[in-house]
Amino acid sequence: MFEAFSNIASAFGLSSAAGLNAYLPLLVVALTARYTDKIALNEPWNILTNGWVIGALVVLLIIEMLVDKIPAVDTLNDGIQTIGRPLAGAVLFAGTSGVIGEMNPALALIAGLLLAGGVHTAKSVTRPAVTTLTGGAGNWFVSIVEDVVSFFTAIFAIILPVLMAVLLAFAFILLAWVLNKRRRGKAISA
């Protein structure tokens, strides 16, 4: 029972990380599955451990990390990644949930799509505001912070999945509280 919860918590963390950077958590999972026993990917997800796939993920990650630091280009990249990040989240959730045999695969894919898609949407909505507020000068810094958060979220989701689940729950509660407070503030001023 604990292992199933741990696998689901890991899948939630990895899918959420994919919403910030599609290729970083995929690469972390691919390398972890290939070189350690922390993750065992079942068919067809074990294709991530193929050397060619890992190489492609490295190239895609480098491109993603470079273009995401440039004002205006990062917005274009976010538009393109509207497909890539949720798909990466779906693959990560389905591949790492560990209960794919017991769970309908469509549910696992949908859960990953929704998690990564939600995080990606929040990123896509806030990034133009960062560009506007800083005249583009803050984009590289925000992008680096997103990459670091994505990387550590993926690592913690693998090493300490239960802690990751608690942190994600706290983050979603905090986000809901902030959005609700903001909505009430707008309603009062209107």
Image: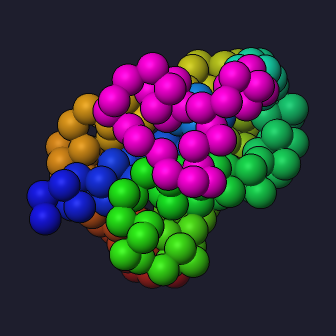
Percent coordinates x, y for residue 133 in the rendering = 66, 34
Residue 16 visible in the shown view: no
Q: Which residue is drawn at 48% across and 80% down?
A: 104
Q: Residue at x 37, y 75 (%)?
A: 102
Q: Residue at x 73, y 31 (%)?
A: 53
- Splitting the image into 4 quarters, where does residue 180 fall? bottom left
Looking at the image, is 22 positioned above or below residue 121?
A: above
Residue found at the very far front of the displayed protein: 43
Identify which residue, 118 or 183, lies in the foreground.
Answer: 118
Percent coordinates x, y for residue 164 in the rendering = 26, 44
Q: Does the magenta stretch include residue 47?
A: yes
Q: Main secondary structure of the magenta part?
A: helix
- Splitting the image into 4 quarters, where does residue 12 fall? bottom left
Q: How many labels does the image show?
A: 0
Span shown in magenta: 29-56
Percent coordinates x, y for residue 42 in the rendering = 50, 51
Quarter of the figure that contains the N terminus: bottom left
Looking at the image, is 7 positioned above or below residue 145?
A: below
Residue found at the very far left of the displayed protein: 2
- Relative horizontal placement of residue 170, taking residue 127 as reference (left or right): left
Identify which residue, 124 or 189, lies in the foreground.
Answer: 124
Residue 17 visible in the shown view: yes
Q: Does the magenta stretch include residue 154?
A: no
- Relative horizontal placement of residue 82, taking residue 37 as reference (left or right): right
Percent coordinates x, y for residue 15 in the rendering = 49, 52
- Splitting the image into 4 quarters, where does residue 75 fall? top right
Q: Colour scheme of this structure image?
A: rainbow
Q: Which residue is drawn at 49% across and 70% down?
A: 108
- Relative horizontal placement of residue 46, taking residue 68 as reference (left or right): left
